[in-house]
Amino acid sequence: MDLPVVNHEDYFAKIGDDHKFPINKFGELANYLIQNKIVKKFHKPYACSLETLSYAHSKNYISNVKNKTLSKEEVKKIGFPLVDSVVQRSLVATGGTVLASKLAINYGISCNTAGGSHHANYNGGAGYCVFNDVAVAAHYLLNRGLANKILIVDLDVHQGNGNSEIFKENRSVFTFSMHSKTNYPAKKSNINQENFDFVFYIAGVDIHFNDRLGKLKISDEGIKSRDELVIENFFSKRIPFCGVLGGGYNKDFNKLVELHSILHKSCAKCIGL
Ligand SMILES: [Zn+2]
């Protein structure tokens, strides 16, 4: 079996060449995965529907994004200009994680080449996150009866505060977020253990020592060990597993693409074992 991987050319958005966010990484990651024969052909997502989005976001917020009528402050909090391609990317990347979660149910394991927008909460976006794709997909699985107890393993350097807020009152979804103490945001959540029947993994590579935003000092090998440990653990237990990108702002762009690909390489390796 080949690893099912979701990608869309609209993951790229026109945010300006001098923008701090390395938006070109999505296209380059797709090229890298094809060139290195990790993926033969991508699964292509649709833009997430309003109905599915509204499982995790208020209708008011969704329509303000779609109509580009968010306030200046709300746009500033997100950190991207609110232009058509950003709206489109947010819808398609969220649809991508929903598709990847369905592929994980069918094939046992899958990945998106974007996703992990874990700072977005019910009423708004933040920190380069417009819609919380994992929260939307988790609600989608629960509503369709495709999962009953979902674990979100978030190993991005930043805390998944959007997910912990969205699922604060929801006993069917647990967010395990391990992150750097000195990174934003300051307030942290607790850790717990249950019997899960679906796992989302947010594989942020901003834990790397050469990252512009992360304050951890993890090596390439360290990231590889982390991903293999997490993926093998759940794959061997036959718990459907869906990997999404998470953050990554390496000072070296080519290294950044390579680091993000470790998620897909490690999943592909797991299938081959
Ligand atoms: Zn991050």
Image (spheres, rainbow, N blue to C red):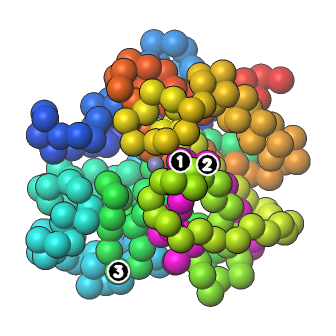
Q: Which residue lies at the image location 74% right of the left edge and 73% below the top edge?
A: 148
The answer to whether residue 227 is above or below residue 177 is above
Contact between labelled residues 2 and 3, with CB atoms less than 8 Å apart:
no
Q: Secondary structure at mark 1?
A: loop
Residue 152 lies in magenta, yes or no?
A: yes
Q: Amino acid at mark 1?
A: Val
Contact between labelled residues 3 and 1, with CB atoms less than 8 Å apart:
no
Q: Is mark 1 within 8 Å of ligand 1?
A: yes
Q: Residue 157 — which label?
A: 1
**Percent from the top left, x then y, of residue 202?**
57, 49
Going from N to C along the chain, the mark reached first, 1 or 3, is 3
Going from N to C along the chain, the mark reached first, 3 or 2, is 3
Q: Which residue is mark 3?
A: 123
The answer to whether residue 205 is above or below residue 118 is above
Image position of 23 (left or right of 144) = left
Q: Amino acid at mark 3?
A: Asn
Q: Nearer the viewer, mark 2 or mark 1?
A: 1
Q: Which residue is mark 2?
A: 155
Question: For residue 110, which quarter of the picture?
Answer: top right
Q: Nearer the viewer, mark 1 or mark 3?
A: 1
Q: How far apart, in angstroms, are the residues tagged by discs 1 and 3?
A: 23 Å
